[in-house]
Image (tube, rainbow, N blue to C red):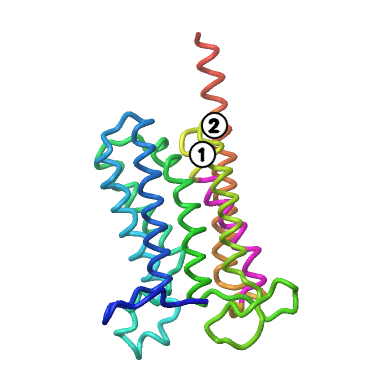
Amino acid sequence: MKPILFELGNIVVYSYGTMLALAFVAGYFLILRKSKELGLAPERLADFAILLAVAAIVGARLMYVAIGWEYYSTRPLAIFNLPEGGLSFHGGAIAAIIVGVWYIRRQNLPLGPVADGVAPAFALGVALARIGCLLNGCCYGLPTAVPWAFDASFLHDLPRHPTQLYESLAMLVVFFYLFSQEQHQHFSGYLLILFTVLYSLVRFLIEFFRDVPAFMGPFSMAQVASIVIALVGIAWLILAERRHRLATDLAGVSK
């Protein structure tokens, strides 16, 4: 682990913040690339990418603070200590979707195609951000004796499951899969819903190896949220796919 990449005088460059910034830069260029395919002015999607980044960070931090309010209520200044880590993916995703849909509607952008365009960017962003978690020593796994275990937490106590790396590698696979499916023949917006389902399933499985408290029975809060989101996403995929096929069949008959 290396929570601090380097220091220049009084300037401290944190690993987590650096990887988070790299994740958003990578997503920014992927979204700009999509603007050319959609025939949109790059600056319109550039503003969209920046807005998504801000919304995601704010939403992710607010949910993380809300979950850990017992700690932050007595340390209010720690709420703003973002460079050292502390974000909730679900909070960031919810905020980004709400703000993103609002912006797309306001700018009269094509909702479905833009959603397809940002899905791979989300996956790559998560993959890079989790490397930041590994360097920071947060989001660590349970102690274990598996051969690949190592000191993956800021506790510096025992070899643990490198769950940060598990999720990073899994989301890298999801990224390449979504990227390969950009020319899909499904309904518009399919890739974003697929990403939501895949991420939720990945997170649900990895949580079994993370050192987190139980929330409902044997499941953590993230697992409960993930399974609910996955079920909603799967239902949405099925219904939207049926509607798309019906519309396609009717269009073929009318010809």
- Taking 231 as reference, is 61 above or below it? below
Q: Residue 23, how many percent across, how many down? A: 42, 57
> In the picture provided, is 7 more to the left or to the right than 151?
left
Which residues are the magenta region? 193-210
Seen as rendered, the residue at the extreme front is 8
Q: Which SS type dominates the magenta stretch?
A: helix
Q: Which mark is residue 145?
A: none
Q: Say above or below: 206 vs 182.
A: below
Three-letter amino acid code at disc 2?
His
Q: Is residue 147 left or right of residue 191?
A: right
Q: Position of residue 47 (x, y in %)?
A: 26, 47
Q: Nearer the viewer, residue 232 or 180?
A: 180
With respect to residue 156, does 32 lie above or below? above
Residue 184 got which mark? 2
Across and down, in percent, residue 221 comes to 55, 72
Q: Residue lying at the far right in this picture: please name it.
A: 146
Within 10 Å of the Cα at label 2, are there few (<14), some (14-19), or many (20+) other Cα atoms? few
Which structural element holds mark 2?
loop
Q: Which of the two discs, 2 and 1, labels the residue nearer the N terminus? A: 2
Q: Which residue is mark 1?
A: 190
- Residue 198 lies, with reference to residue 157, above or below; the image says above
Q: Quadrant of residue 10?
A: bottom left
* Viewer-nearest of discs 2 and 1: 2
What crowding class fits label 1: few (fewer than 14 Cα within 10 Å), some (14-19), or many (20 or more)?
many
Q: Is residue 15 left or right of residue 172?
A: left
Q: CA distance from mark 2 to mark 1?
A: 8 Å
Residue 209 located within the stretch drawn in magenta: yes
